[in-house]
Amino acid sequence: MGEECVNKERDSEIVKGGCVVMDTPDRKHQLTPPVSKFEDSPVFNYLNSLSPINSVKSVHITQTFNSLTFSSPPSVFTSPHVSSLRDNRVLRRHQFSDPSNPEFSSSLGDKEEKGGKATEVPHNIEKQNCNQRSVAGKSSAVLLHETSVAVELPQTLSYECVSPDCIGTSHCGLETSGLQEMAGSSTELVPYVQIGPGKESVEKEVHLEGPSRIHEHKESAGCDWENLFSDEVDSDNNASQLECGRDMTVVMDQDILASHNKPVAGDTGDNVDDEIGSNLQRGMRRRCLVFEMVGSRRKRLDDGSNCSSSVLLQSHENTASGDKCVVPLNPASDAPKRRLPGIGLHLNTLAATSMDHKTGKHEAFPPGGQPISVSGSAAYFNLSNSQLIPNSALVVTSSDRDICPLEDGILTAENAVPESGCMVNEVLDHSSPKKKKRRSDSGGEAEACKRCNCKKSKCLKLYCECFAAGVYCVEPCSCQECFNKPIYEDTVLATRKQIESRNPLAFAPKVIRNSDAMIEVGEESSKTPASARHKRGCNCKKSGCLKKYCECYQGGVGCSINCRCEGCKNAFGIKDDSTLTETEVELEEGEAEQEKRAVNRSLQITTVQNDAELKTSFALPATPLQICGSSIQPFSSKSKKPPRSSLLSIGGSSSGIYGTPRFGKLNPLQPLAKIHNDRKDEMPEILQSNASPNSGVKSGSPNSKRVSPPQSIGLSPGQRSSRKLILQSIPSFPSLTPKH
DNA sequence: GAGTTTGAAACT
DNA sequence: CAGTTTCAAACTC
């Protein structure tokens, strides 16, 4: 029911959005032309089908931005993005013009001047992507078409979203869309901009709106990250940007291409990329759906920003999943609320990517939405796993929870629908109550969608898997007196804040990867299970860490020093202080080195590998996590336990969450590494997952040592250099925490 | 499907 | 910080 309403709302919004768009005729015109260009591509066709919606969305986006801009940032997740949005114009220009980022400036200049060149576009796109992340919604408007494409991106975003920052999750989605747009249409847009020199400023804004906004957002939000990164990293504003851009671009390129080629189709699971993307998206969606979604979506919807998320959702699915998810949220709080910090998510995010992919397919989105969830969005959790997401399938197996939560939203989506994950699926699938069944019931895919069965917690406590995952409860849930619904967004957010104030990492992925080390180390990742760790460690006394009662086991990771378990028999790895510590130490050390290397490489390489790298990096941009992390960090104080490294892992964990389960059991790390190597898409996902989770976790993680956000930044550089690097970098994130 | 077990989360 | 209680998932029957 709610979903329908939501959909209706969307439509109405869309219409409104259209109106809004009308407000800026220039934009429309500009936008449309680009579309024509795309016509040739399959994607374009797909878009055409979706075009109406897209257009609307795009419009929304603008609105969204506006609204977003004005709307107060979600208290909980106050994401820099929001603020950034306001500054968009200036920021854009800065970014573009920003001397610090030669590439950007150049690229920008090119765009503006040349605008049309695709080659240039990538850079711009990247930049935009970065910005978009924050702004996401903005881009969406322009890129409507892209939205379909965006779907894939969203996934990546999803992770980001997962991160608290993510508030922007929605943004993420938007961003992704934006990115896609950027990638695909962005170039066009640029040209347009250029076309009207006089108008450039305005046009840029318009076209750029998506992008620019994004940039702005980034700057404000994402940008802040960038700044942070840049600051931290120093020299590498470019690198950071590049990373973001790269990730974005990568995603864009591949995903877009893939999506375009197989656009909506996501149907075929064949396309790993698509799947991954879908997963990511899913994750994103999930998140969005969840907390962030509420706020962000609302904003989007309200603002019209829906764009990315909504757009994605709409376009892709229509699929309702996303839409529904979004809608529900929005509807509930028409008030533009902010995104939830949803870190958890993130980690939450993480549901099984594979699942997501599947769902994506189901949805027909091409988008590959990754299942974040598993993808992890929301994050971070299993993000590590989720990161694996691509591998997600693996993850899925590992632990349900970590993954599930994320998955729920995400996973479910995966299963059925993509994004919304559970939300979506549920909504969509409501018809099929099955999903509700427990993860176990659902099995691998089923896991994706988590459904809680809370009776007394009102789904406002961490007891509730959905809540813990940063996802709203969906129909499939059997909860009673549930307040974890978009309608109660305020309550949910407030509760989240409370919990986060108590434990900043509460919503962070529980499982952290050391993938970094793993990756670096190599495939030994097989050992990886061990490398991945539970943030806090378990406290099992009777289960011998051989049952799902054990979070470590559930997460598919070995027990670590952090664990206080008795009679540990964890199949993934018995707690071994020495072992873990060693790995951690290695990771940390390695991270530092890697970071440096990455930076250097990024600097050197950036120019070269731009596309792929950028794409991947973009995924990282998940940096939102970083942002989140930054935001979170304050909280970190809490860490009750001294959990070790896990903090770092957190990021990973977030991703891991999704992936964890599957991976966990298998080998979370390995898959990741492989993925990285194998596909760009994968990389992005991973990155995303990693990024968000890590950052979030790190910052958040109490344990923490990990202050590492900077480190994470460092990682980004690595990403810049190359996917491999990125991978390394990712690992570095985990390590980052340890260092601290 | 109901009941038990388990361990995390929440509370004191 | 430690201990206890509450809670819901996981598990068993």
Image (tube, coloured by chain):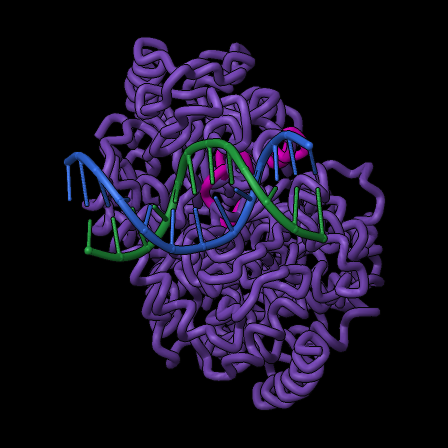
Chain colours: A purple, B green, C blue
Q: Residue at x 27, y 38 (%)?
A: A710
Task: Please give left or right for residue A346 compared with residue A683 in the image.
Answer: left
Front residue of A688 and A322: A322
Q: Residue at x 56, y 73 (%)?
A: A329
Indicate whether residue A394 is drawn in magenta.
yes
- Judge whether A572 appears above or below A412 on screen: above
Front residue of A503 and A591: A503
Front residue of A672 and B1: B1
Residue range (magenta): A376-396
Task: Please give left or right for residue A551 compared with residue A121 in the image.
Answer: left
The image quarter in which residue A39 lies: bottom right
- Judge whether A122 appears above or below A385 on screen: below
Does the magenta stretch mainly form a helix, a strand or a loop? helix
The quarter of the image holding the N terminus of chain A is bottom right
Task: Please give left or right for residue A584 compared with residue A181 in the image.
Answer: left
Q: Residue at x 25, y 41 (%)?
A: A702
